[in-house]
Image: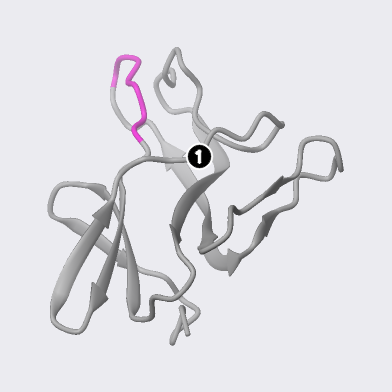
């Protein structure tokens, strides 16, 4: 649905907001999942992939944000259920390059706001 880079993750609750440590920023993805299977499935956050000067870096660890609207359900999604959420990845603040989200192997989605990191 969208993505943005920010030094702060704003949750709508000032006590739950998180500020990036020095030298870091957050890439916040607004994503939707839908389970098209006939049984429950666990959704995985996937990886943030950034191409920098010919090298490809994969950020596969999301930040824990303890606020509604962030993260994935631990128990999975029932059949035909959709879930919209935000995933947060911490990246160095001094990088630049194209940003992709890779929710599964062989699926790579370009973040729409390009050039993204400057």
Question: Which residue is pictured at 77% across the width and 36% down the height?
Answer: 16
Task: Give the magenta part as a residue range.
Answer: 38-44
Task: Give the x, y percent position of residue 49.
Answer: 27, 61
> Which SS class for mark 1?
loop
Question: Which residue is pictured at 67% across the width and 29% down the height?
Answer: 66
Task: Give the x, y percent position of residue 75.
Answer: 44, 12
On whether residue 40 falls in the magenta region, the answer is: yes
- Picture layout, residue 30 above or below residue 76: below
- Other residues around mark 1 within 10 Å, as few (<14) / some (14–19) / many (≥20): some
- Picture layout, residue 18 above or below residue 74: below
Residue most extreme to the front: 22
- Picture layout, residue 36 above or below residue 48: above
Q: Which residue is mark 1?
A: 63
Task: Find residue 100 and report its image quarter.
Answer: bottom left
Question: Which residue is pictured at 44% across the width and 84% down the height?
Answer: 114
Task: Give the x, y percent position of residue 13.
Answer: 85, 40
Examine the residues drawn in magenta and state their main secondary structure.
loop
- Picture layout, residue 15 above or below residue 50: above
Question: Which residue is pictured at 44% across the width and 87% down the height?
Answer: 115
Specify the color scheme: one colour
Please say whether residue 42 is visible from this viewpoint: yes
On whether residue 6 falls in the magenta region, the answer is: no
Could you tell me how many numbered marks the image carries?
A: 1
Task: Give the x, y percent position of residue 89.
Answer: 46, 50
Left or right, residue 70 beside residue 11:
left
């Amino acid at each position: 649905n969208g993505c943005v880079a920010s030094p702060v993750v704003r949750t709508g609750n000032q006590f739950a907001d998180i500020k990036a440590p020095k030298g870091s920023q957050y890439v916040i993805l607004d994503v939707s999942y839908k389970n098209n299977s006939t049984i429950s499935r666990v959704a995985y956050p996937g990886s943030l992939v950034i191409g920098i000067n010919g090298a490809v870096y994969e950020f596969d660890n999301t930040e824990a944000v303890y606020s509604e609207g962030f993260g994935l359900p631990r128990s999975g999604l029932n059949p035909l259920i959709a879930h919209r959420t935000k995933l947060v990845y911490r990246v160095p603040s001094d990088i630049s390059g194209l940003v992709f989200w890779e929710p599964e192997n062989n699926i790579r989605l370009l973040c729409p706001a390009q050039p993204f990191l400057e």
